[in-house]
Every structure is written in C-alpha cells, then in structure tokens.
Amino acid sequence: MTVVFHDVVLRRAAEDHDFCPAEWSLEVLATYRRRLQQLDAVHLEGDLHQIRSLGVRVRSASDGGSLTIPLGKQIVLEVHVESATNGLAVRVVLDGFVVLRKEKSA
C-alpha cells in the first residue's frame, strides 16, 4: 500500500534518519517508523483493524472515517484510507499527529 504524507514533519521523520520532531521522544520516533512498516504491509482496509499492534481506533463516523494510531501515551497519528471500489486499500494518508495533553486534576 502506498503511504501519502499530508504533513511535512511526518514525511521528514520517515525519510530523514537524523530528524526527530521536537514533541517526540526517540521511543515515539522508533514506534512511528515501525508503524510505517506495518502500514506498508496492509492490502485491505480491514487489515488495519486486524493488526492488533497498530491499535487503530475510529475517530468518529461523522469525521469521514478518520482513524488514529497511538505512537505513545500522549501522541496519536491521524490517518485515513482511500480505497478502490473493489475494497483494496489504495493508500493510507497520514494527515498529521496530535499531542494529547494531560488534564489537570482539580
């Protein structure tokens, strides 16, 4: 499957082995690169949900079926899948990432 990057930081983190986004630890970067290898092995959209180690979650049905994949405790990758009419996943589009903030306890 083809992986498409809509975020330049995600592209650079995938292609430049000396680059790590400021918000990420080296552990998150290693997880991200491992997730890219796993996404490369996907042939059907259903495969995304079968690979349990990806931890894919549907963000919301009203959001056009976008998905999240955790990269660590506080960082999730936002993706969506573009499929052909025969059900084959044509490409995974990496839309960006979100750093989750801990809520302050009162």
Image: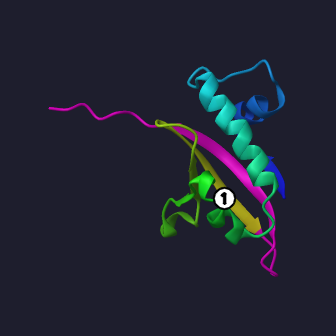
Q: What sort of colour scheme is used for the picture?
A: rainbow
- Drawn side of residue 89 relative to residue 65, left or right: right
Q: How many marks?
A: 1
Is 25 displayed left or right of 32 in the figure? Answer: left
For mark 1, give the secondary structure.
Answer: strand
Tell me, yes or no, if residue 89 can be seen here.
yes
Badge 1 amino acid: His
**Residue ranking furthest to the left:** 106
User: Percent position (x, y) of residue 69?
Assistant: 58, 50
Query: Height in image: 106 above or below 86?
Result: above
Query: Which of 90/53 is in front?
Result: 53
Label 1 crowd (10 A; few <14 / some 14-19 / many >=20): some
Q: Name the one closer to the observer, 63 or 14.
A: 14
Q: Is residue 12 magenta?
A: no
Residue 81 rendering spot, x and y as whole percentages: 71, 62
Residue under label 1, please give it.
80
The residue lying toward the viewer, choosing from 34 and 11, is 34
Identified at 47% across, 37% down, the residue is 73
In the image, which residues are magenta?
Answer: 83-106
Identify the image quadrant of residue 12. top right
User: Residue at image x 49%, y 68%?
Assistant: 62
**Dividing the image into 4 quarters, which one contains the C terminus?**
top left
The quarter of the picture where the N terminus appears is bottom right
- From the top left corner, tell me how far across and down residue 40 is, in percent: 81, 53
Q: Is residue 6 visible?
A: no
Residue 39 spot, x, y in % from top left: 75, 53
Quadrant in the picture for residue 11: top right
